[in-house]
Structures are given as C-alpha cells and as structure tokens.
Amino acid sequence: MSTDSFSQTTVRQFVLGRQGLWPGRRWKGFEGLHAAVQEAGSIQVDPLNVVGRSHDLAFCGRVEDYRPSLLDDALYGKRMLFEWGGNLRIRPIEELPFLLPLMQVADYKGQREHFFQTHAALVSRVLKAVETRGPLGGRDLDGGAGVDSYRARKDTGLALYYLWHRGDLMIQSRRRGERLYDLTSRLVPQRWLTPKPLEEASERMATGVLRSLGMADRTGLTRILNSAYVKPPRGEARKVWVQEREKSGDLVPVEVEGWRGPFWTDTEGQRILEALARGDLPRGWTPLSTSTKEEATFLAPLDIVVAAGRARQLFGFDYRWEVYVPAQKRRWGYYCLPMLYGDTLCGRADLRYDSGDRTLRVLGWWFESEYSGKDLRLAKATGRGIARLQGMIGGESISLAGIKPGRFRSVCMSSARATK
C-alpha cells in the first residue's frame, strides 16, 4: 500500500480546519454551536475565568458572535449538548447512546465501584433524594462525612458525582458554578436513552477521537485506545488492531514531510488532505466573515490543537499553560494564550479581564518572529481579534499597555476601535 505524503503546512490547515478554526468561523447561533461541537468532537471545560473560561474561548474561535449565554441555553435549556467525563467535556446529545455503555465501565482504578460497595446505603439515599426533590447539588444534602477527594468535600457530594459519572444523573444546571444534578431520564428524551452495544460504542469513541485529533501518531493511537477501551490492546494485539483498521480503511497511513512517523488519519481525512494539497478549500469550510488572516484568534489554553504538546508538534511553538506554575518560574504569564494568524501561531499574549472597570487588559506580549512587530497587517488582525474577545466577555474598554512596539500597539488599538 502506497502512503501519501503531505507538507507540514497542509497538515496544519487540515488539523485546524477539522476543528473549525481555519480559515475562519463557519458557524453561527444555536445550530452553529451544535455543529461546532459535532465537528470538534468535544470541547474541554475549565471553570477558571481570567479572560473568559477555556471552553468559552474555544467556542469564540469557532462560532460567529458567540456569547457564554448561548452555551448555557444549549446545555441546560435546549439540551442540544451535555457534559460528561473525568476530563469534563461538552458533547453533542446524539452521542449519549454511545457513551452510556462506556459510562457504565469507565471507572478509574476501580475507585467508583469501591465507593459504591462501601457506601451502598448512602448512594441509594442520595439517588432517592434526587428522585423525590429534583435537581440537587452537594450543598443541598444534609450531613455527610468529609472525604479526601478533589471531586467533593463530603461523601454525599461524591455520591452525586459518581452517580453522574455512571450516567444515572446529568448536570441539570449550575448555581454560581456548582453543578446541580437531576435524573438523566428526566432531562433527556427517550430516543437518546437506549445504549448501544459496548463494542459499537468503543469503536465510535475511537473513530471520534481520531477525527478530533485529525491525525494521530503512535502516541495519538494510545490516546485513542485508552479513551475507547476498558482494556486497550497492547503488544501484538495492538499491531493486529491497527492492521485490521488499515485494511478496512478506518485508519489510513500518511507521511508528513520533515516529521518522524508513522501517522494515521481516516478516509475522509485523506480526501481533505489531498484537496488542501491541491490548494482547494473543502466544501463547507468558507468563513462566514473574516478569515484568520484578517482577524487573529486567541486560542483556548485547553484547545486540542495546542494542549498536551500539540502546539510544538503542529506549529513548532513552545506552549505551556502556566496557571499552575509558581510565579517565579513562569516564562510568559499566568493566563497566556497562543495567537493564531492565518495557519500559524504568531505569538502569545498574557490577558486579564478586570470586571470592576470592565477592561480587557494585555499584560504581556511576545512575538514568535522579530519581524512580526513590524507587520501592520498582523497589527490590524490582532486588533480585530481583541475586539472580538472584548465583545465575548462583555468588556467596555481595552488596555494594550503590554503590547510593544508602540507603532504596532497604535495600529492594533485603531483596528479594535474600528471593529466595534
């Protein structure tokens, strides 16, 4: 079997495009939000709000005129989306039948099952409380013993968490950030509550993770298998797993010029790569308004295209989210975000939103190239991106004090003001 070879530029465009980040935003409104999650596979949730939450930033880069209220309504009003996972992710509701069987077996080191066995009466009492009283959070349950867990402070709260993790409960809404749980059967239409067979669900998960990655190397395959199987195949069984899927076309081997392989994508991915290599834009990828060359995008710190070392692999960009790094050891800043311009990462910005005076502040700014500070087209695109971010978080003013040189900052500010 011959293996196609693609340039690094083509691969970057492919991975970004499959995530809806390039060449520009192509979705809008509730249906667009739903389509963005379908295309991305899932969006990771993080509650830390410095300049918008990570998942809000991810949607802002994909959905035209995105606001956090749009997501809240899609999750808790229209229920087009739902949240699940130890690594909490937003997912399309139509994936629930495929996740239900995995929820039953997704038990990290047997911790959930051990809790259910040692706290059987408590779990039964908590589930009964939700059945009779409706949506509840940990603070709504009296009593309870303290537990050594970052999931909850009391065993009653941990019972709620594990019942949600097993699929009995779903997040009904949030109360100042706290999850309120209700019965899944009360929140979701019956058509989504019939679980698929476990083997089919595992295959679906593997396919979905590959699609969200766009392309996977051996490390990526491990990620795919760990997410989809209770006991992932290893050694010779893993080789057989890959060979079977290469034969069926579910895995297509590809090469990337200048990268050490092997790499795999899926059949659709191969067609998209071939189109991009010819200079053709895939159907449905046309931006609704500005492209990333006209308006820079601040990427979410947990976005799949930059998190977990992928920024270095895809862009040669050294990125580490430093919120958990001691201040004296930070290289860039507390909440530093990569900036996408065209199909490259051109720099990074340390940002903060001050709710008191409703000001979006740029505290620090670093270009990847010395020339970038003289590129006034980039300055205009940056201004548009900052204005977009200001609109998403509801800010009234902008401070660009952290941007240098001054000429770049001036053009950036003029562009931001003109964009409003």
Image: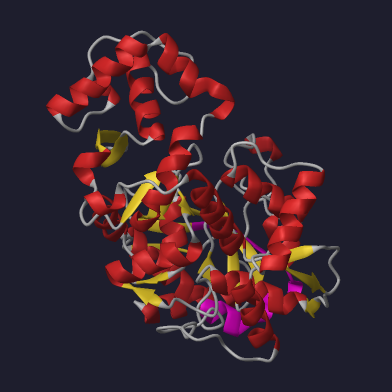
Regarding residue 51, the answer to whether it shows in the image is: no
Residue 163, magenta (yes or no) = no
For residue 247, which quarter of the picture?
bottom right
Judge by depth and name the residue closer to the eye, 380 or 229: 229
**Can you say whether 115 is above or below 186 in the image?**
above
Image point 36% across, 36% down: which residue?
167
Image point 26% across, 19% down: which residue?
126
For residue 363, which quarter of the picture?
bottom right
Residue 389: x %, y % from top left:
42, 65
For residue 169, which quarter of the picture?
top left
Residue 379: x %, y % from top left:
56, 78
Where the N terminus falls, by quadrant? Answer: bottom right
**Can you say whether 107 is above or below 295 in the image?**
above
Start and end of the magenta stretch?
A: 362-381
**Can you say whether 53 is above or below 284 in the image?**
above
Q: Is residue 399 left or right of residue 183?
A: right
